[in-house]
Structures are given as structure tokens and as C-alpha cells.
Amino acid sequence: MSKDASLRDALRVPTGPISTAGFDAGGRPLAPSAKKMAQHLEEMADLQERFWAESTGGGGRSVLLVLQGMDTAGKGGVVTHAVGVFGPIGIEYTAFKKPTKEELEHDFLWRIRKRLPRPGMIGVFDRSHYEDVLVVRVHGLVPQAEWEARYDAINAFEQELTDGGTTVLKVFLNVSYDTQRERLLRRLDEPEKHWKFNEGDILERARWDDYQAAYGSVLERCSTDAAPWYVVPADHKTYRNWAVAELLRETLTELDPHYPQPDLDVASLRERLAPPH
Ligand code: AMP
Ligand code: MG
């Protein structure tokens, strides 16, 4: 059997100067057959159960999936269709919104640290500390010197997480300008999707180039050996969902979790469960 090619190798951000224009939002690298996809999803559920079970025996490891992308890139779809195969046990999901007044009184990583996954858990961040060098940079919400210092702070933070046993998987869902327009228009076409439409999204879309530049800096400055970035083409939804699932599957496979082996006296336990006379 030939060894499967690694999606992480295919989607990992290369070192050197980065422009998001260099990534194809419509690509489908290593897309498998529908049969293979279904098989992968089954494997994922099994791996996650083992990962969680292992922690009950004292395993200290966790995984953190960071999802970033422009509006309509599909962070929600990925949570439903890729992370969703795990079921709720073992998942800790957080959607980071505009910081509250209390959160703004602390360092930008304060609210992030509170939501880090516990051992055995897969933490999912729908937006993250990266907003503090994305929306914050694009809108100048803090002085430049302050957000400039955050790239190094983020790298140090993620190194600390990795050293503590957390595998950090960072995914940029790369949607194209044209596909975003189609998806926003579709939200207007369908009354059941109006609730998803946010006028603010049009204002953000008007800053597209600024956001792409900010994403370029993130990918260039914060893709480290400890915590690399992966760019997932997001114009095709089925591919996008599979790709994130596959990145998780590869990650969990490499972690190779094992069920704990408690020392049970099975014969005597069976005896005690025997039907009463
Ligand atoms: P949504 O994900 O569509 O529910 O929107 C969440 C909103 O919160 C987006 O407009 C983000 O830009 C905003 N947001 C998230 N984190 C931050 C942050 N650290 N600073 C400012 N705005 C943020
Ligand atoms: Mg939104």
C-alpha cells in the first residue's frame, strides 16, 4: 500500500514573503473519492474517542483548532461538517466576538487563555487572538506599535502551548473576492438566510485589500515550526470541509492516542454481574 500523501504538507504555508494572492481559493489538492472521504470521517470519530479516553487515564495532551477567514469563508460550516463528526463530548467550542469592556481592560490573550482546551479535549476557536492583528490592524483600534508587538507575543504564546502538550492547528479558510460576493448575494436572495446577513459585512468587504495584507502578515510572521498555518481553499464547500477534517485526522493519527488499560479483574466482575438465583 502506498503511503497517503499528507494534506498538511500540501497546505502548509511556505517560509518567506507571503501574499494571499499566491494561494488558489478554488483548488482541491489531494481531494479523495466520496468513499474515501466517508472512511476518513469514521476514522476521525474513532481517533477522537481514543484521544479523550486516553486523557481519563492521565494523558495530558490537547488539540487546538484555530479557524480564521473572511466573512462567508465558512467557519460555521466547518464547525458543523468537519468538527461535527466528533459529537459534543471532547469538543470545547468558542466563538470570539468583539471584546467586552472587561476583556478590553486586560491583555489581548487574557480571554483566549481562559478558553484553552483541557487535556483530552479538542478546542475549536471560531476567530481567535489573530483578530487582534486583523480587524484591530485594519481598523486601527490600537496604535500600530501595539499591534506590531503582537506577532511576537502570539508566537511566544503558541510556543508555550505546544511545550505544554497542546497541538496547535491553525487554518486560514481562503475564500475569493468573487465567491464572497456570490455568497453574500445568496444570503439576500433567500429570506431564510437574511438572519445571517450583516450590513457590517459589506463595510468589511470594502476593506478587502487591507484584510488580505493583514492576513499576509499573519501567515508570514506567525507560521512557526511550533504552530504552522495551513491555507485551505474555501471556494468549494465540500472540499473545504473535508480538508479541515483531514488536517484534524492527520494530526490525531500522528498523536496516536491509546485507550487506557485499567487493571480490571474481569472474571470477578463478570461473576458479580451474573443473574441472581
Ligand atoms: P461573527 O463571527 O460574524 O459573529 O462576528 C464577530 C465579530 O467580532 C467580527 O466582526 C469580528 O471582527 C469581531 N471581533 C472578534 N474578535 C475581535 C477583536 N479582538 N477585536 C475587535 N473585534 C473583534
Ligand atoms: Mg459574520
Image: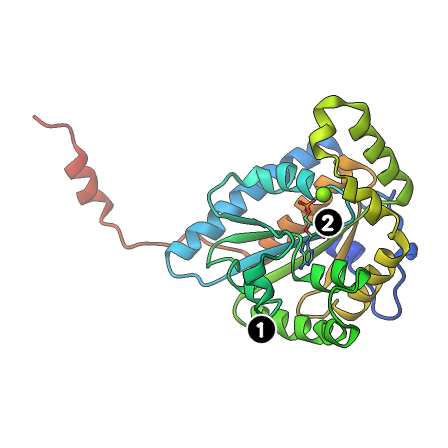
User: Residue 79's spot in the image, x, y percent?
Assistant: 63, 42
Q: Observer-nearest residue: 40 or 214?
A: 214
Q: Which residue is mark 1?
A: 160
Amino acid on which disc 2 is placed:
Asp
Point out residue 170 in the picture as x, y percentages from the top left corner: 69, 58
Q: Nearer the viewer, mark 2 or mark 1?
A: 1
- Does 66 sit above or below residue 219? above
Q: Residue at x 85, y 31 (%)?
A: 185
Disc assigned to residue 4: 2
Check disc 2: other Cα within 10 Å, few if <14, some if 14-19, many if 20+.
few
CA separation, marks 2 and 1?
31 Å
Say which residue appears at 49% left-offset and 52% top-offset: 51
At numbered mark 2, what does the secondary structure look like: helix, strand or loop?
loop
The image quarter in which residue 102 lies: bottom right
Q: Nearer the viewer, residue 256 or 196?
A: 196
> What residue do we see at 92% from left, 55% from top?
21
- For disc 1, the neighbor class at 10 Å (few under 14, some 14 to 19, many from 20) is few
Q: Where residue 120 sits in the image (x, y, percent)?
A: 47, 55
Q: Position of residue 232 (x, y in %)?
A: 78, 49
Q: Secondary structure at mark 1?
A: helix
Confirm whether residue 6 shows in the render.
no
Residue 134 shows up from this direction: yes
Query: Viewed as shown, does residue 57 lie left or right of 70?
Result: left
* Residue 104 in the figure: left or right of residue 181: left
Question: If the image is split into quadrants, where does the C terminus sit?
Answer: top left
Q: Say whether residue 127 is left or right of residue 121.
A: right
Task: In this rendered view, identify the residue nearer to me: 199 or 158.
Answer: 199
The answer to which quarter of the image holds residue 271 is top left
Q: In the displayed structure, would residue 201 be above or below residue 172?
A: above
Say whether disc 2 or disc 1 marks the residue closer to the N-terminus: 2
